[in-house]
Image (cartoon, helix red, strand yellow):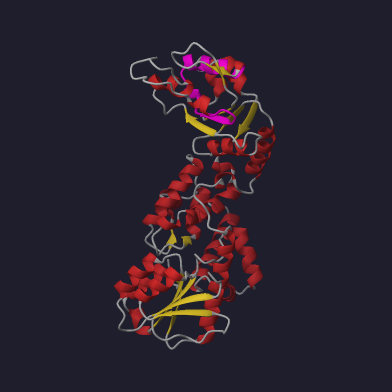
Amino acid sequence: MTTKSILCVGVGVPRLPADWELIAAATPAEARRHYKARPCAVGLLIVQEVDRCDDLHAFLLDHWAVHWIAVLPPAALEQPAWRQLVRDHCIDYHTTPVDHERLRHALGHALGMAALRHDAGPPRANDDAMLAGQSTAIQRLRRHIVKVAAASAPVLIWGESGSGKELAAQAVHAHSPRRKGPFVPINCGAIPAALIQSELFGHERGAFTGAARDKRGLIESAQGGSIFLDEIGDLPMELQANLLRFLQEKTIYRVGGTRSIAVDARVIAASHVNLAQAVQRGAFREDLYYRLNVLALDVPPLRERGEDLLPLAEHFFHAFASERAPRVRGFSSRAAQSMRDYHWPGNVRELINRVRRAMVMAEGRLIQPQDLGLGAAAAAPAPLQLDDARIRAERDAIDASLLRAGRNITLAARDLGVSRMTLYRLLAKHGIAAPSHASYTDGQSE
């Protein structure tokens, strides 16, 4: 895909610079064939009065990843269906007769933003974004992970539910000398009590009804790598003794077996409950606790990672882009503020779920607090001090200006009476995402 190729759908090709490649298609059907052979990051949609809105809507829905710019007759914008199509699918629009200079500028900007996105590569939903960020707490965790990974002793990870304990365990394994070996995760609370011993340690043929053959356990399958025991506090007391023996002797006995089996696997355990307190209650073996708690890691909750909150939300917005309603372009400033004000008891997992729900349920162009399920928190904010009120008013003014300007920085800065550089600094100050491929709109209100 060349960075200067544009798919033009419709009749009436505009004048473009010589170094731009225009792939012209008179109909959506023809455009589908061209796009399949030559995918483009930017598209130009030329609407005629005879065109059917439904046909174009179906085509654009199938090609949502393209940055579309529409050219329409002024009369088309008087019809709700065409306005809805532009809101749902286009990053910008122009009316006929076309101002070719302005259109070339819009296309050039779209091409530039598409090239930056292509260079960065698409974000992934299953990467280690939960451990990414610039907050002091998460940077400290990353430093500790590297140090802990170099050792061979057991690791005990503590963190609230949804904070990313398994990802921290995976990071320890990935940075360790055992990285080429298997990483075997086990949720101790998810395996039925009647099966957990067989699942962990395996069994011999004939050990019980249904044991028709020998079976390796999960610990044995982690040979040469790491075994991650999540929610180890849920492990039954009788199995805690077996695990302690493995940690001491590096051997196991299968259920029904009489011979010991040596297993070279590092144990990484995690819990959302305080194991020291569980020891005092008699719910967890003290000797096992001290065997596990050699190298400790604390995964910070999301509420302690204020600087990372909005970047994480943006990451998950793009990572799950295939699920979003086509009209949704990003987060409103009010949604961003509601996320800052929220306590996030479910941590990063809750943030992922709320963002995914909002991307589907949002009815406007920008996600609002109620789309995130945070409307009540936003509707009754704590009393503002004077400085807080000024900051909030400034943020709202910037957001409103960006909307009026169609997310165009130059026009928004002119509207606010400041320079472009000043506006960029204000955006950074208030944590407002700078306009990008996903935030350019037709200038409609939220």
- Does the magenta-highlighted stretch encompass residue 238? yes
Relative to 159, is 203 on the left or the right?
left
Q: Quadrant of residue 300?
A: top right
Residue 24: percent from the left, percent from the top?
44, 80
Residue 12: percent from the left, percent from the top?
42, 86
Residue furthest to the bottom: 97
Q: Please say whether residue 37 is visible from this viewpoint.
A: yes
Residue 222: percent from the left, percent from the top?
54, 29
Position of the C terminus by quadrant: bottom left
Q: Quadrant of residue 276?
A: top right
Which sits in the foreground, 239 or 18? Answer: 18
Up-down: is 439 above or below 352?
below
Up-down: is 400 above or below 11?
above
| First to last magenta residue range | 222-248
Q: Please say whether residue 370 is visible from this viewpoint.
A: no
The residue depicted at 44 percent of the width and 13 percent of the height is 256
